[in-house]
Amino acid sequence: MSENNRDGKRTARERLAVEREKQKAAEKRRRALIVGAAVVGVLGLAAVIGVVAANAGKDDQGSAGPVVAPSGANGEENLAIPVGKDTAKSTLTVWEDFRCPACQSFEKTYRSTIHELTDAGQLRVEYRLATIIDGNMGGSGSRNAANAAACAQDLGRFTPYHDVLYDNQPPETDDAFSDDAKLIELAGKVDGLNTPAFRTCVEDGTHDGWVDKSNEAFGKGGFTGTPTVLLNGKNIFQDQTMTPDKLKQQVQETARG
């Protein structure tokens, strides 16, 4: 065999070897791309499943979490916070919003009379909480304050904290009650309330779901605004002649039978 033929064969073999190496390299790249795509696909599927699962969880609990009624709440779906003796012959149902200026006005006008009648065992009050100012003005102060009041109920301090909130109510456009620190600060005005249990309840929004449920009941009740005040089922807040003395007279007459 001539030298030229041998050189030609070596060159051909070398070219073939190089081509094979190229093919091997290309095959490795192809396999790597396939594996990478598979991994990305699996991760993407996992992410989708995670999002669906997370959203499913939110749908199950709602944005405010589970409905946890405060201690001692009663009435339909445990949406009422009772104050006074069960043996009282008159029941005053008060729908309120802690951001509502008209509610503050009602409280300041009728508070001492209501306390007198409940202390005497002649009147039982059912407080029901709404959040219509949050809906009208924006913010979350109505809900947060209502949750904090429910937390106070858990510790047997609802009435004094309820009164403190109205005594320190911010202007309607000021969402100051959305600040947990503010609500906790005000708890310091009530003996025995500013405790770790109360602070945790406020900061965790333990009763937010219950507050939302109460507000839904307010809407379904067909009421036009807060406060809505019912004495033995009759709307007395719409009675232009109603006064604290008249309320006291009606409750005492019912108590006497």
Image (cartoon, helix red, strand yellow):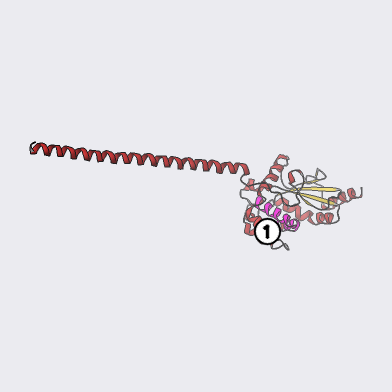
Name the one closer to the observer, 120 or 76. Answer: 76
**Residue 100 placement, left or right of 39:** right
Q: Horizontally, is 221 left or right of 242 in the view?
A: left
Q: Which of 252 and 77 is in front in this view?
A: 77
Q: Main secondary structure of the magenta part?
A: helix
**Farthest-out residue, right:** 257
In depth, the one of 40 and 148 nearer the eye is: 40
**Residue at numbered disc 1:** 197
Q: Where is residue 172 in the image (x, y as percent from the top left)?
A: 65, 52
Bin the neighbour count of mark 1 within 10 Å (Cα to Cα): few under 14, some 14-19, many 20 and up. few
> Which residue is found at the position 70% from the left and 57% from the top?
165
The total number of labels drawn is 1
Query: For the magenta stretch, what is the residue range?
Result: 143-165
Image quarter hosting the N terminus: top left
Q: Is residue 162 magenta?
A: yes
Whether residue 174 appears in this view of the structure is no
Q: Residue furthest left?
A: 2
Q: Where is residue 35 in the image (x, y as percent from the top left)?
A: 39, 41
Give the residue type at disc 1.
Answer: Ala
Compared across the picture, whether 239 is left or right of 165 comes to right
Which element type, helix, strand or loop, lies under badge 1? helix
Residue visible at 49% across and 42% down in the picture: 46
Residue 248: image x %, image y %? Answer: 85, 52
Q: Does the magenta stretch include residue 45?
A: no
Residue 220 visible in the snapshot: yes
When the figure is inspected, residue 203 is found, relative to residue 79, above or below; the finding is: below
| Image coords of residue 23 (percent x, y) | 27, 38
